[in-house]
Amino acid sequence: MAEQAHQDTTRAGSTDLRLTVVYDNNPMKPGLQTAWGFACVVETGKTKVLFDTGGEGKIFLANLQTLGIDPAEIDRVVLSHFHYDHTGSLAEFLKKNPRVTVYVPKSFPEKIIEDIKTAGATPVAVTSFAELQPNIFTLGEIGGAIPEQSLAIRTPKGIAIITGCAHPGILTILQRAKSIFPDEPLYLVIGGFHLVNATKKQISEIIDGFKALGVQKAAPCHCSGDETRKMFSEAYGNDFYEIGVGGIIEVR
């Protein structure tokens, strides 16, 4: 499948957002490797944030190289939750760039936190909503069987949400975002929606929830499942983004 870059423009001079999926189990751009997991590079202003790292370090680093992304240019790392397919490449990344702050949910296993310190990086335990960099926020650790954090980015079009696996529930995450940003539209949601085993009825209810919360554009990938992607595509039409490894979304 050919590479696709989606761009939305409001006005000249506004701070833009560029999201590049660098690890995913859905193919998109020839020459990149797919594997179960997720990682996304977030660029806004002069800031580059790595959200999750995928699982296999060799695949992750190879994809970065193919995409022309230098690990040394990453400013911050945000890990959604402790599962291997989202943290497995962290050690390989830190060998290339240990001079980063790594934000992890407070409930993260102590071993991962110690490994971050040993690599020379700085771990920060996340509990509640916080601004990590200008216009880049963590929604805080959202509890459940598998606690997780998601990113929120303020764009000229509204709030963009990036999820890892959405273990606490994708609608729970979006409701948290809406409660924090009540006067700003939820413009885009991208990432794993944790619906790979969901029924059509359950997916339909999730889509209804997206619409009720005013989500304007959807880009499900990773653990969302093929049926979810199909149903979101039908429901959102031109506002659905087919996304996979190498996919790029730009908001301006």
Image (cartoon, grey):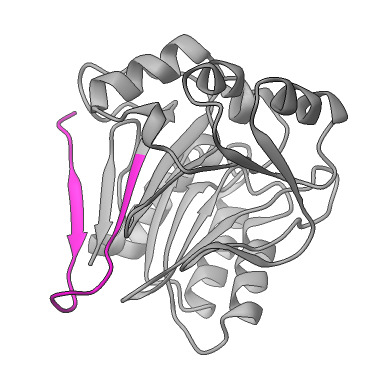
14 up-or-down from 97: above or below: below
Nearer-the-camera pick, 90 or 178 = 90
Residue reaching furthest to the top: 58
Looking at the rendered structure, the number of numbered marks drawn on it comes to 0
12 is within the stretch colored magenta: yes
Quadrant of the image for the N terminus?
top left
Nearer-the-camera pick, 223 or 103 = 103
Nearer-the-camera pick, 139 or 204 = 139
Quadrant of the image for the C terminus?
bottom left
Instruction: Write the residue at 47% across / 74% down.
Output: 211
Residue reaching furthest to the bottom: 183
Asked if residue 83 can be seen in this view, the reply is yes
Rendering coords of residue 172 (x, y %): 69, 64
Instruction: Write the residue at 81% across / 37% down.
Output: 108
Write down the region rendered in magenta: 1-20
171 up-or-down from 148: above or below: below
240 is within the stretch colored magenta: no
Instruction: Write the residue at 57% across / 70% down.
Output: 209
211 up-or-down from 3: above or below: below
Rendering coords of residue 24 (x, y %): 43, 29
155 vs 97, left or right, is left
Rendering coords of residue 13 (x, y %): 17, 74
Asked if residue 226 can be seen in this view, the reply is no
Question: Hey, which quadrant is residue 122 in on the image?
Answer: top right
Instruction: Write the residue at 48% across / 34% down.
Output: 39
45 vs 57, left or right, is left
Rendering coords of residue 26 (x, y %): 38, 29
Determine the main secondary structure of the stretch shown in magenta. Answer: loop
122 up-or-down from 209: above or below: above
